[in-house]
Image (cartoon, helix red, strand yellow):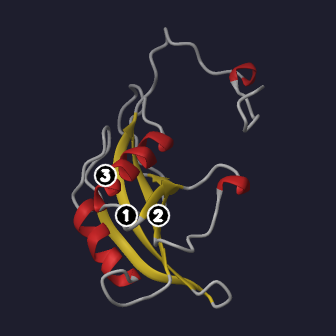
Amino acid sequence: MVTYDALEDEIVGRLSGLGSAVEVEALPDTPAKFQRPYIKPRITVAYRSSEFSREVVRGTPQQLSTGPSVQNEFASVEVVIQARILRGAAGVHAIKAAVVQWLFNFTPTHWSRLTLESYKFVDHDKDAGLFSYSATFITQTMVVPIDDADPLPTLNDVNFNVDGNG
């Protein structure tokens, strides 16, 4: 089964190869788990959004068959880079270049190769002395109907307790 947390985890695992000079993590689930990177630069990976169509544009997919629907999903994954400096070997721009080398054309399980959609300035927190930039990657998978023999999820199967004690 294709899940967004598995996609994030696989990208985090890939970027962990960058070395110990940066911290790499998936977007924390709770505010208590999030801490600003005051010592090392930080890379945070987060599934951002999906579009469901035959093109990477908003619209309704064309269904030309009376059989089961199959639809392309184009997912955006945001890689946020935070560091105290912009330039130099430990700066945001050098980290972005390394991230692109590690992720461009990387193929997560059940997804197509990652391609770079954008790279942009997000914020400069002057109090924390922290620059934040975002690189957005796009990947594709296919949404297919589940087997009728598999049980569909019900609300009884869903647990909204974030600490897992529910």
Apparent side of residue 50 relative to residue 116 in the rendered image (left or right): right
At 65% from the left edge and 59% from the top edge, which residue is drawn? 34
At 37% from the left edge and 63% from the top edge, which residue is drawn? 137
Apparent side of residue 161 relative to residue 59 in the rendered image (left or right): right
Apparent side of residue 25 relative to residue 15 in the rendered image (left or right): right
Rendered image quadrant of residue 70: top left
> Where's residue 59, x and y in %?
48, 58
Which amino acid, by three-letter code, is at mark 2? Answer: Glu
Whether residue 133 is situated above or below residue 57 in the rendered picture: below
Q: Which mark is residue 105?
A: none
Which amino acid, by three-letter code, is at mark 3? Answer: Arg
Residue 54 appearing in the image: no
Whether residue 154 is situated above or below residue 121 in the rendered picture: above
> Where's residue 165, x and y in %?
76, 27
Image quadrant where one finds the N terminus: top left
At 28% from the left edge and 76% from the top edge, which residue is drawn? 97
Element type at marker 1?
A: strand
* Residue placed most toward the observer, 140 or 84: 84
Q: For mark 1, does the 10 Å Cα neighbourhood hold few (<14), some (14 to 19), or many (20 or more) residues?
A: many
Mark 3 or mark 1, which is nearer to you?
Answer: 3
Image quadrant where one finds the C terminus: top right
Looking at marks 3 and 1 on the same chain, the residue that comes earlier in the sequence is marked by 3
Q: For mark 3, does the 10 Å Cα neighbourhood hold few (<14), some (14 to 19), or many (20 or more) residues?
A: some
Asked if the residue under mark 1 is in contact with the one under mark 2, i.e. CB atoms within 8 Å, the reply is yes
Whether residue 153 is situated above or below residue 111 in the rendered picture: above
Q: For mark 2, does the 10 Å Cα neighbourhood hold few (<14), some (14 to 19), or many (20 or more) residues?
A: many
Mark 1 = which residue?
Answer: 137
